[in-house]
Amino acid sequence: MAKQCLILADKLLKESDFENARQEVAKAQKLDPTNPYAYAFLDRIAYFEEQKKKGSPAPEKTPATAAPPKKESPPVQAKPPVSHQQQQVAAKPASPQKPEPRPVAEPGKPDQPQQKEQAKPETSPVQPPPVKTEPVRPPAEEKPRPPVPPPPKKQPVESAVEASRSVIRDVMSSRSAGTKSPPSASTPGIGDVLQQISEAAHQLAPNAPKGNIESKLDEMRRQIEMLTNSLDQERKVREEINQQQLKGAVKQFRSALEKAWANGAPKDEGMKLLQDLAISLGITEDVLHTLNREVKLDMYSHAVKEVVSKQKLLRNSSRTLEWLRKVYQVSLDEYLEYESKFLMDLVADQYKGTILLVSGDTKTTLEVGQKLKSTGYAVVGATSPENALEKIEKINPHFILCDMEFSQGYLSGIKFLHVLRANSKFNYIPFILLCEKNEMTNIQSSELRPTEGCVEKPVELEQLNAVMNEKLTAFRQYLSSI
Amino acid sequence: MGKVILLAEDDEDNRDLVQFVLMRGKLDVEVIVAENGKQAVEMAKTHKPNLILMDMQMPVMDGWTAVPLIKAEPKTRDIPVIAFTAQAKPEDRARTREIGCVEHYTKPMDPEELLALIQKYINP
C-alpha cells in the first residue's frame, strides 16, 4: 500500500502538485515508516518545488513528452540534482523482490536515462544538491563519517627530526673524532629528543592509536641505545689504548733518560734530543721534568752504591761522593731531600765488620748468619770451637758468636771463651754466647766481663743487635782505657 | 767517539772503578781493557790508543816488563803511559820514569785527580 501511495506521489510530483505529493508520501510513511524511499521522495519533492520557484521546468516534462535534449548540451554535464542515494532510490524504486512498473517510465524507454533527464534541468548549470530543508532520516546502513582531521602540522615533527639528527650527528662526529668531549649545552640529549618526538607525534595525531607511535619510538630508542652503547664501548677502548700508549711512551722515554743519565748529566745536545723525543712521544713538560728528576736521582743513587762498594779502592770516599754529586748535578737541596734514602742505600750494603759464628747446628748458622749478613756483617762460620781456633788467626773477627754446647770436640762455649781470654791477642774481642733458656740464669750469674754476654736461642735479630751494641760500647771503653 | 784509552789492570774491581770514573769524566773516550802486560803490549800495537793506564803488578807479564816493550816498538813508542800502582816509594817513582812512563799515579785513586791527570794527556 505504501508503494501505491508513492506511485501516486510520483504522478502528483510530475503534475507539480507538490502538496498532494507530500500528503501521499506522508501516507506511505505512515503505512511503512521504515520505507527509505518515502524519505527520498520528500527530498525530491522539495527539490522540484524549489526548481519551480526558480523557473525551471517541472518534472512533468518527462522524456516522453518533453522535447528531446539539445545536442549542444551534453548529457554528461547534466547531473541529477539529487544525491547518489536519492538517485538510486529514484532509479530503483521497486524493491528487489519484484519488478514494479515504473511510475513515470514509458514502455520501451530506458529507465535510468529517463530518470536522469527528469532529474536534470536541461539548461541549468550544475548546482550542488540543496541543503536538506527537512530532516531526512538516513538509510539504516548509512553511518556518519568521522570528522576529517585538520591538515598535519609539520613544524613539531620537523623540529623533532632535526633534533634527533643533531644528536646523531653529534654521536657520529664524536665517533669519527674519537673525542671524549661531552655534547654541547645547546645539543639536546637523547631523552629530550625522544620526548620531543613523542610530543610531536601526539600533536600530529591525537586520536591515532598510541601503539603505533610507541612502537616506533621504542624502535628509535633501541637504535639510539645501540648507538650509544657502541659509542661507549669505543670510548672505553680508545681510553685504554690512550693509557697504554701513554704508558708505552713514558716507558720508552724513561728508558731513553736512563741511558742518557747512566754516566752522569747528559750534555746539552743530549738534553735537546731528549726534549725532542718527549715532544714526539706526546710527553708534557711537567712529566718530562718529573721523570728527569726521578731518573737522575735513581742513577745517582746507583752510582753512590757502586762507589761505596769499592770504597777500599778510593783514596777518599767523601770526596768521591761529592764529585759524584757534581757529575749527576744533584743539588744540595735534592741531596738533603733524598739523604735518608741514600743513607739507607749506603747502610744496606755497608760493611760493618766480620763475625765468627761458632755453631754445630747448621740451622742456627744459616738463620743467624743470614740475619747478620743482611745488616752488613761478613759472617765466617765454624762448626766447633776447635774449628774456630783454626780460623780466628786468619780472619781476625770483630765479634764472636758461639753456642754453649757442641757434639764434636771437647770444648764447650764457656771453655772456648776461657781459651780466648788466655790469649792476649783475642781476649777482648766481644764474645756472645747463644744459650738455651734454662742456661741463661747460670751464665748471667757467672762472672762475664763487660765485653761478654749471652743471647737466648732462637736468636731474635733485635735482641742480638742490642746485645752486640752493648758489647761494642764496652769494647770501645776498653780501647780508650789502654 | 774521540780518544782511546788502554787500561791494563788485572783486578776486576779496579778495572770497573777506573771505567766507572772515566765514563763519568765527560772525556768522550773509549776504554779498552787488558788483563795483563802481555795483552797490553798486543793491544797497544793493534789499537794504537791515545793513552795507556798501566798497573805495574800483574800476572803473566807485569807493567815493569810491558812498558819497555811498548816503548821499544816504533808503532807504540809515542803513546804516553801512566803507571797506575800501589807502589808509592820514591824509588818506585823514579823507576817508572826510567822505563818510559810519563806519570806515576798511586792507588787508591781519587776520581777527580785521576781525571785531571788523564785529561792532561788526552786533550793537551
Image: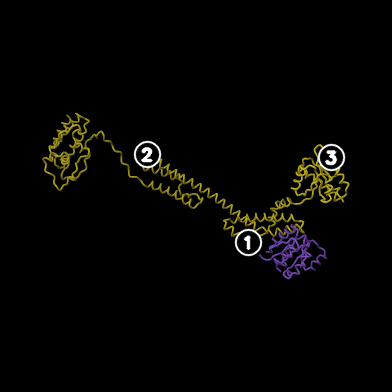
Chain colours: A yellow, B purple
Q: Are marks 2 and 1 in contact (CB under 8 Å)?
A: no
Q: Are marks 2 and 1 on the same chain?
A: yes
Q: Are marks 3 and 2 in contact (CB under 8 Å)?
A: no
Image depth: mark 3 or mark 2 in front: 3
The residue tagged 2 is A209
Q: Is residue A482 left or right of residue A272?
A: right
Q: Is residue B52 above or below residue A14?
A: below
Q: Which mark is residue B91?
A: none
Relative depth, front residue between B20 and A102:
B20
The residue tagged 1 is A270
Q: Are marks 1 and 3 in contact (CB under 8 Å)?
A: no
Q: Are marks 3 and 2 on the same chain?
A: yes
Relative depth, front residue between A242 and A15:
A242
Instruction: Indicate the quadrant containing the C terminus of chain B: top left, top right, bottom left or bottom right.
Output: bottom right
Residue B42 x/y as whole percent: 72, 65
Residue A156 x/y as whole percent: 38, 46
Name the amino acid type tagged 2.
Answer: Pro
The residue tagged 3 is A443
Name the amino acid type tagged 3.
Answer: Ile
Task: Work out which residue is located at the far bottom of the displayed protein and give it.
Answer: B74
Gap in angstroms between the C-alphas marked 1 and 3: 67 Å
Mark nearer the N terminus (1 vs 3): 1
Mark nearer the N terminus (2 vs 1): 2
User: At 57% across and 51% down in the image, what residue appears?
Assistant: A244
Mark nearer the N terminus (3 vs 2): 2
